[in-house]
Image: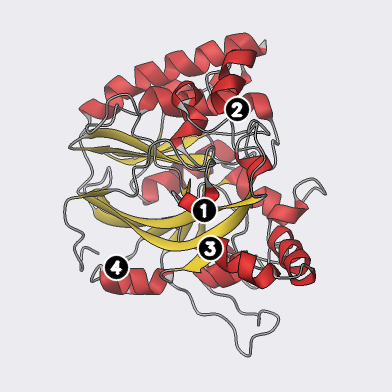
Amino acid sequence: MATQAERTDVELSNIGARTIPEFEGVHDVWPRGERLKAVRRAAQMYKQRFTSQGRIRAIKSVDIAAAPYPVEYAFHNAVSVPTLPLISMINRMIVVQYDDWNGTARTLVFEPTVPDGSAEAPFYRNLRALIDKIPGGHLAEKLVLSYYNEPGEVLEKLGLAPDDIDFCTFDHLHVQDPRMILGSTEVIEGETEPRRALFGDAKMLVHRRELATLQSLHPMQWAWYVDGGLAGVDPAKFVTFDGDIELGPGIALLWTPGHTDGNHSLVVNTPDGVWVSSENGIALDNWQPELSRIPGVRKYHERFGREICPNANTLEDSLDQYDSMIKEKTLADPCKTDPRWLQILPSSELAPRKRQWPVVPTYVHGGIEYGTIEAGQR
């Protein structure tokens, strides 16, 4: 009988992907100070090989929605002045086209958030109930909540059809409802018929630990996941993996645990160098607090001697999240327009809205676009 590792290798081979040997075992190194060193060394080694292997064909991000988020979570309670309790962060869907290791042209959708699904996570349900009780709460909600595009509309704008998509993935499954992406044989509460798959036969790439979390939630995780989000979803719609994987030249999904056990980051090589995307932070200020103008964030860096200031709504393992953000910083290249800043694009990015001052990002990439997204590659 095949081992789990052997089954994973076969599954990855079937989609033209492969594991990354440089990171094998680094997250098991002990003690924790040595683990951080091992993660950094492995990232430095891998970057040399990753950049030499080639680039993706094209990439483009499109805004989906702006959602409310507590300031206290966004910067690990570092903000040192009175502020609005909620800020807005913008969810973006990213479409990437690349060749896999078998030479097959592929299209990946990263972060195809369906706002209706996210609203059903207990955290947002409870937040909505609280807002409803506050006089003028609905007006306040309008200041932090905006809708721009549904994932299906994004495809149309890019000239793509659902059947053009090979894979979709999220860096983690907080506030995501897989039924609304992959379809379900069961009717979601409040709806009249089962959901159809958003991207045809596309499969969802998900770290094995992240999928297992959604299958068996701990009370400390419960508020951030859509309970029942797997009901009626065909298990064959998932491609699971462990650790770090390369999907093809110039594109990888790196395991970055801590924010959640199965968190992973999108890494792509472009004409301007390497970009990284995840929600370990919601602004570049999280990864580079020494440059931050948000009150308290630079002080957090100086007081504790920390190279990062994490997005800390769950902190399933704060030390792992620290190491993971160093892993991301090591991979990312300096920004071409301002080399002080790294090419890290938060998968949910703090909105640069004046009414949120002084909790506004010190520097904003505002999206990513290289090459031309083309239909009919499948």
The amino acid at mark 2 is Gly
Q: Position of residue 317 (x, y in %)?
A: 69, 31
**Camera-side residue of 87 and 341:** 87
Q: Nearer the viewer, mark 1 or mark 2?
A: 1
Compared to residue 323, the image places residue 311 above or below, namely below
Does the image show residue 228? yes
**Camera-side residue of 108 and 340:** 340
Q: Secondary structure at mark 2?
A: loop
| 4 or 1: tag closer to the N-terminus | 4
Compared to residue 185, the image places residue 158 above or below, namely above
Identify the residue position indicated by label 2 in the image. 296
Q: Position of residue 358 (x, y in %)?
A: 53, 40
User: Which dot marks residue 136?
Assistant: none
- The residue at the point 44 percent across, 29 percent down is 328
| 2 or 3: tag closer to the N-terminus | 3
Q: CA distance from mark 3 to mark 4?
A: 19 Å
The amino acid at mark 3 is Ala
The amino acid at mark 4 is Asp
Q: Position of residue 169 (x, y in %)?
A: 46, 54
- As drawn, the residue found furthest toward the bottom would be 192
Q: Is residue 142 left or right of residue 231?
A: left
**Camera-side residue of 67 and 29:** 67
